[in-house]
Amino acid sequence: IRRHGLQMVGCCRNPSSNGTSSLIDTANFCVHSIQELNPSDIVRSLECSGKLQEALDAANQLGIQERESISDTVESVQKRLWEREFNILALKSIADDAYVITQALQMCKPYLNLPVPDDLEDYRSVITLALKRLSWSRLATAASLGGPESVEKAKVRLQNTLLHLGTYQLLGRVLGGQEQLSPSHFLTCFSVITLSDLAIQFAENGDVACLSLLVFRHWRELVLDAGTRQEGWEWIRRLPPTLPPGEYAHLLPVLQKDEEDSAFNVVF
């Protein structure tokens, strides 16, 4: 009845004889009057009873002024709906940018084993939404995240997660078993492996297709930055000697002459 804006006021004619509380016996309930509820009270009542989607539906039927008067309540309902059901529409409707960004960053941590959406596209939507919110982040949002440096770190973290997620899905297509892909599997099984270890594994198995996909998508980590480390391009050295060079020639470095000092540089 409250959902329709009405509230029954009455009493029980035959209360429990033992004095303990019990459910109202509708057969003995006497209605004194029916009162009209304030629309905002309906939304708050539905939220308190845990009927979050119904509370949002009721709020959407309100006028602009009435909706603004309960904006905090609506925001609370949307957050609870997201946290309880991973409702993407509710998350997109939340005005608190810092909250949305923080939720996405928590889902980028592979070792915490936190709850995440079951669907990969829903997971991608969360990360993408957070990046959009970061792109127009206001001073208050930046302050709540720890300042401009924290905002930049958050942006890099979210971008890297999207890049790794794309690699994960593409490798799933090449290797088969796409039906087994999920955000939880991505975080607990794929994200915990370093790219260099994964490249070495593909190289040792002679899997040029997966190795090529990995190298071209993560060029900086596996080629540019690898040249500055002691182990260098270890994944190249792990290719089986029986593998025809023509199959992996596109992954090998070449010598390029420097026009200024006539020296040769190693390039890919």
Image (spheres, rainbow, N blue to C red):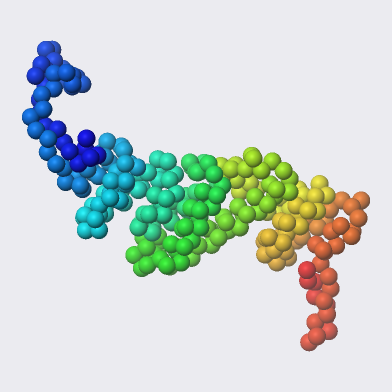
User: Quick check: can you spot residue 209?
Assistant: yes
Residue 118 in the image: x percent, y percent?
A: 53, 41
Residue 76 in the image: x percent, y percent?
A: 30, 48
Q: Which of the 4 image quarters holds residue 184? A: top right
- Relative height, residue 57 to residue 127 (above, below): above
Of residues 130 and 69, the one drawn nearer to the viewer in this rendering: 69
Residue 173 in the image: x percent, y percent?
A: 70, 48
Residue appearing at x 57%, y 55% in the figure: 161
Of residues 74 and 202, the one drawn nearer to the viewer in this rendering: 74
Instruction: Please identify the quadrant where the C terminus is shown.
Output: bottom right
Residue appearing at x 83%, y 80% in the figure: 257
Left or right relative to 180: residue 65: left
Instruction: Please identify the quadrant where the N terminus is shown.
Output: top left
Residue appearing at x 73%, y 59% in the figure: 215
Of residues 25 and 171, the one drawn nearer to the viewer in this rendering: 25
Residue appearing at x 23%, y 40% in the figure: 4
Left or right relative to 48: residue 193: right
Left or right relative to 45: residue 157: right
Residue 3 in the image: x percent, y percent?
A: 24, 39
